[in-house]
Amino acid sequence: MLQTQQSPGLAITKGSVFPMPLPHTVVFTTANGGSDEAASATSRSGLTGCPWHDVKTMLREVGLRPTRQRMALGWMLFGKGDRHVTAEMLYEEAVKAKVPVSLATIYNTLHQFTDVGLLRQVAVDGSKTYFDTNVSPHHHFFIESENALVDIPHSEVVVGRTPIPPEGYEVVRIDVVVRLRPKAR
């Protein structure tokens, strides 16, 4: 079954955002493989286990300035281990944590994080896009009744012959989304 965790609290005083202690272990994953996405992902070698410091390090390593809003959103995304979120889900977490940020800023930040390889974008429907903190090669189950993604290890899905892309294009990655629903009784 899927796990849900409450959004961690942030203390905001005179324009500064400070993280509250996390009640769980922080897990960061590195990308593997030969794709550009893997090459652009950070090495994560300088991580200290302190989510706030680690987010700042991650942002700097990929060339993003660690602004307060990027730091707060990065802390909310990466301080909970591997997860799948939509912009709306992250916005709700930010509101609950009293992080002053607009939905437009969240969309911009998620796309910036994706562009530099910190997140992976997974399109489920034309109108539903998730952002995955696990950028390693893998696929997904989509549980339709819960609107939730669950990781499938890369080795459990075998993709046949890859089509030849049109002239001037290259295959970046292949995403497999397997849709699930409860069995009929």
Image: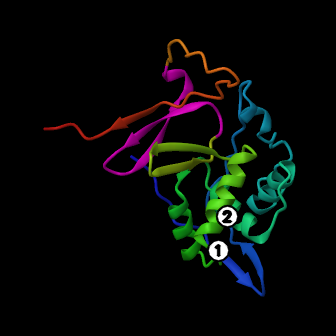
Mark 2 residue type: Leu
Outermost residue, top direction? 161
SS of the residue at dot 2?
helix
Q: In the picture provided, is 78 more to the left or to the right than 93?
A: right
**Any magenta on residue 140?**
yes
Residue placed under numbered mark 1 in the picture: 101
Answer above or below: position of 133 versus 172: below
Looking at the picture, the colour scheme in use is: rainbow
Element under disc 1: loop
- Tell me how far mark 2 sits from mark 1, CA to CA: 9 Å
* Residue at 13% in and 38% down: 185
Q: Nearer the viewer, mark 2 or mark 1?
A: 1
Mark closer to the chain start, 2 or 1: 2
Residue 104: x and y in percent read: 61, 67
Query: In terms of image quadrants, where is residue 93?
Result: bottom right
Which residue is at a point 82% across and 63% down the rendered structure image?
A: 66
In this view, 102 is above or below 34: below
Given the image, on which type of amino acid does mark 1 rest? Answer: Val
Per the rendered image, the range of residues in magenta is 135-157
Are the residues flagged by discs 2 and 1 in contact, CB closer than 8 Å?
A: yes
Q: Which residue is mark 2?
A: 73
Q: Residues within 10 Å of mark 2 (few under 14, many from 20)?
A: many
In the image: residue 53, left or right of residue 129: right
